[in-house]
Amino acid sequence: MKRLLALLCTVVAVSALTAPAQAENNTSASDSPQRACSSLTAPRLPGARVTSVTTDIRPAGDVAASSQSPVVRSVPAVCDVTVVLTHPGADDHVTTRVWLPLDTWNGRFQGVGGGGFSASGGESGLAAAVKGGYSAAITDAGVSTDGSTPSAWALDSQGRVNTPLLENFAGRSLHEMAVTGKHLTAAFYDRRTFSSYWNGCSTGGRQGLMMAQRHPQDFDGIAAAAPAANWDRFIPAEIWPQVVMNQAHDFLSPCELNAFTQAAINACDRNDGVADGVVDEPDRCRFNPRALIGERVVCDGTTHRISKADAEAVASIWAGPTTPTGLRLWYGLNKSTPLTYLAATALTPDGARVGAPFPISENWIKYFLERDPAFDTSALTYADFEDLFRQSQREYNKIIGTDDPDLSAFKAAGGKMITWHGLSDELITADGTVDYRKRVERAMGGAQRVDSFYRVFLAPGVGHCAGGNGPVPTDPLAALVDWVEHGEAPETLPASTTTPDSTVITRDLCPYPLHARYSGHGPTASADSYTCRR
């Protein structure tokens, strides 16, 4: 789970269109970086008041690892700007950080997104962007950087939802970060125009979609991977596996859960004509978990027999959330997806196995739906779950749903957007991304028109933002830059992975709804042996 939380909280992003006109600095980095840095001022931000601006020259070197991200080495020297602002009446303090490379700028601005309940990817996100030549910005949105819990900010002193801070987190602070970052970039380099990109995954992916929907002129290009869109639905849906196990009084061990996943992969691996441990189209996998009833599984030296209750629980988890009468509410996990995150269990000191809810989903319910940090989600019935699911939609869709299919303003502004999503994502099912893409097509005149500015690529076997058994996109941001700056729409996204025996597997991910099909000849580990077909 720590790996997934780290991925949720590690995101990089990029943004810039035409820079704001009021670049008040009269000294550019080409003249004197130190003087240009110290004389930078913040832009005017409607609805906000800037309380402080500090600048400093940060020398070249390594950026230390955090609990969220690894160390980033050999980061160039930057002008480090911190802008603090507040929104009158909100009692908030929002910090935006902007790093401006002193002599390695590539002429582009990059916004850096967050993960989980954190709006920011931290200094490591800035460092990765700057190392790539970008000027870069992050915002904390005035909330905690703890991606797993909103306990420090979700409720006010009266126990009510802190709506201004939720609005900051949902999108308001992202726009202010973009305006601030581009203003400072324009002033520091004495450039009026430059390219801008967003590059984020998970919450960072949702942030990218939010910008396309509500602030369509902030970014030229948006790379929104595994987006946490449909937030009001998929976040409560993540507790569904726990509800299923609690209601059945049947808590499967990680070993037993993995047995079901592996059995599904074994049964459906060859559906695409290649035996590679990857299910290319998990929605066409017809494996029935009841086929394992009676099978023995050895876990930590102890033999377990798969029961009917075990199989029924997994079937319900795969099917996804429903009402007590069987009406689907949201999508379930794909059969090739590890179940050990959302269906996690743990042993109590006395040896009993109990559910271990994914903290982001559990805390959404505790703080934003029940408004009670002590609420016990293990007591939820199926009827309770439906009530909470409906409440989440009703109260939060307009604030943070991030599911508006009307991208006409983004298209009119010349924006381009790429989304890729792993089909074995442990946390955010790719079905939500496909659902959104289909709604965009219906709203905007069909697939061909949408492909002209927004493309989706599905990655078989890939987990949340990375990992898994399948090839992971190698540089989707580069593909986005080519599309924005050279008009070269990506026909495929190059992807690769290395197996435990050091075999390098390459694949070209195809734009939805196409799939990479084996040609019948050539090495199955090579992208050259596949073509994009339905």
Image: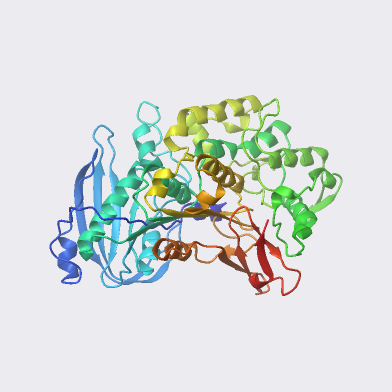
Which residue occupies 18% across, 58% down?
40
**Does 492 sit left or right of 273 as displayed?**
left
Q: Residue furthest right?
A: 294
Q: Is residue 447 left or right of residue 347?
A: left
Q: Nearer the viewer, residue 152 or 433?
A: 433
Where, quadrant-wise, is the C terminus in this rendering? bottom right
Residue 484 appears at what percent x and percent y?
A: 41, 61
Residue 78 in the image: above or below residue 237: below
Q: Is residue 352 among the parts visible in the rendering?
A: no
Residue 345 is drawn in which quadrant?
top right
Left of 319 or right of it: where is 330? left
User: Residue at (82%, 39%) from the top-left corner?
Assistant: 308
Task: Describe the colour scheme in one phrase.
Answer: rainbow
Residue 162 percent coordinates (x, y): 37, 32
Q: Work out whether residue 419 or residue 300 is closer to the camera in this orientation and state it.
A: 419
How many discs appear?
0
Kindly tell me whether residue 277 is visible in this rendering. yes
- The image shows residue 533 at horizontal and vertical percentages of 67, 59
Q: Is residue 38 above or below residue 451?
A: below
Question: Which one is in front, 407 or 147?
Answer: 407
Q: Residue at x 62, y 52 (%)?
A: 513
Residue at coordinates 45% horizontally, 51% vertically from top-left?
A: 204
Looking at the image, which is closer to me, 380 or 47? 47
- Name the outermost residue toward the left: 26
Q: Position of residue 267 (x, y in %)?
A: 80, 54
